[in-house]
Image: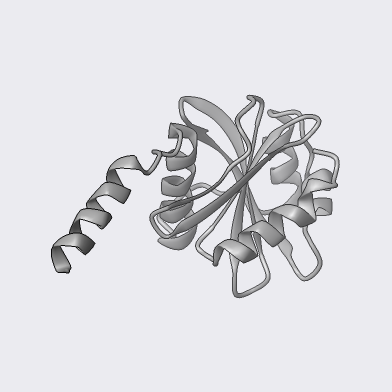
Amino acid sequence: RSAILLLAAASWLLIRPTPPQLYTDAARDHHREVVDRQPRHWRSTAAEIDTVAAREGFSAAEALALAPAGYRLEHAKICGLAGRPVLHLVYTDGVREFSLYLLHAPTTRQAVEVGAENIESFEGSRFTVLVVTEAPAAECRQFAAALANKRL
């Protein structure tokens, strides 16, 4: 009986699709920068966020307007994911934190789990959006759904 369980677990690990590099990079980045709070040079004021966001064709006003009810924009910076610069925005409700990565490259819509991080992605009219959090998958999906109808 335990041999069957072991075989089933091994089979699942072998056939489970590997998430694209973009997703594993986003999960690693979120974990290091947001969960572990490794020292980074975040931009926190509206003027600083505006300067950083403008490099990616975005603005602080747009970033502030994205916050779903009960959340606020905490800070922003430019990160590198899969060799591309992306705008990394962090939103919090004081308990949960969500990273939003905005990039100018198409990707397939996916909901994946990488380590302890849940990731939801969607295509906006201007950006591909990755939502990353250590919160449960249902909360990640709900946060992404709140953003899906906004002008991204």
Q: Which of 43 and 76 is in front in this view?
A: 76
Q: Which of 34 and 106 is in front in this view?
A: 106
Residue visible at 39% across and 38% down in the picture: 18
Q: Quadrant of residue 57?
A: top right
Residue visible at 73% across and 63% down in the picture: 72
> Residue 46: horizontal and vertical position, in percent?
76, 50
Residue visible at 43% across and 55% down in the picture: 31
> Residue 135: horizontal and vertical position, in percent?
54, 66
Q: Nearer the viewer, residue 115 or 126?
A: 115
Q: How is colour applied across the structure in the image?
A: one colour
Left or right: where does residue 145 sit relative to residue 116? right
Please say if 24 is above or below 134. above
Q: Quadrant of residue 6?
A: bottom left
Please say if 129 is above or below 120. above
Residue at the left extreme, as displayed: 3
**Quadrant the C terminus occupies:** top right
Left or right: where does residue 148 sit relative to residue 12? right
Residue visible at 50% across and 62% down in the picture: 134
Left or right: where does residue 6 sit relative to residue 21? left
Please say if 64 is above or below 142. above
> Residue 53: horizontal and vertical position, in percent?
71, 37
Q: In which quarter of the image is residue 19?
A: top left
Residue at the bottom extreme, as displayed: 95
Please say if 96 is above or below 34. below
> Residue 140: horizontal and vertical position, in percent?
62, 59
Marks counted in the figure total 0
Q: Nearer the viewer, residue 7 or 116?
A: 7
